[in-house]
Amino acid sequence: MENEHNKLYPEDQARVDQYLQSGFNDVERKPFRPLKLLGILVLAVSSMTGLSLLLAWATGIY
């Protein structure tokens, strides 16, 4: 065997390589925006905190 790490027969490897080169699963993606994600998380956590404080105040717990 030429390569000990290659577990596929050459014809199977050729089919895999052809599929990977075909671009079938290529998807254009927007760039990742970590600050946008951080903003969404801060907004979500803040709104849940505010809602829980409002509920606690309305029920007389806080």
Image (cartoon, rainbow, N blue to C red):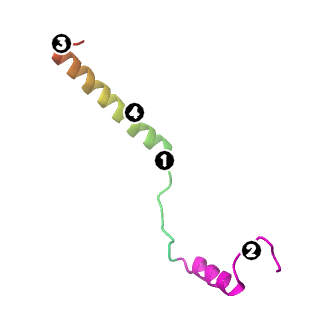
From this view, report whether residue 26 is shown above or below residue 31.
below
Question: Disc 4 or 1, which lies upstream in sequence?
Answer: 1
Amino acid type assigned to the residue bearing label 2 in the image: Asn
From this view, report whether residue 20 is shown above or below residue 30.
below
Question: Disc 1 or 2, which lies upstream in sequence?
Answer: 2
Q: Is residue 7 left or right of residue 36?
A: right
Amino acid type assigned to the residue bearing label 4 in the image: Val
**Residue depth check, mark 3 versus mark 2: number of the one nearer the observer:** 2
Callout 4 secondary element? helix
Q: CA distance from mark 2 to mark 4?
A: 47 Å
Please give the residue where the numbered disc 2 appears in the rendered image: 6
Amino acid type assigned to the residue bearing label 3 in the image: Gly
Q: Position of residue 8 (x, y in %)?
A: 69, 78
**Residue depth check, mark 2 versus mark 4: number of the one nearer the observer:** 2
Q: Residue at x 50, y 77 (%)?
A: 24
Question: Disc 3 or 2, which lies upstream in sequence?
Answer: 2
State the image quarter where residue 42 is shown.
top left
Q: Nearer the viewer, residue 47 or 56?
A: 56
Q: Are marks 3 and 2 in contact (CB under 8 Å)?
A: no
Residue stretch in magenta: 1-23
Please give the residue where the numbered disc 4 appears in the rendered image: 42
Please give the residue where the numbered disc 1 appears in the rendered image: 33
Q: Nearer the viewer, residue 15 or 41?
A: 15
**Residue depth check, mark 4 versus mark 3: number of the one nearer the observer:** 3
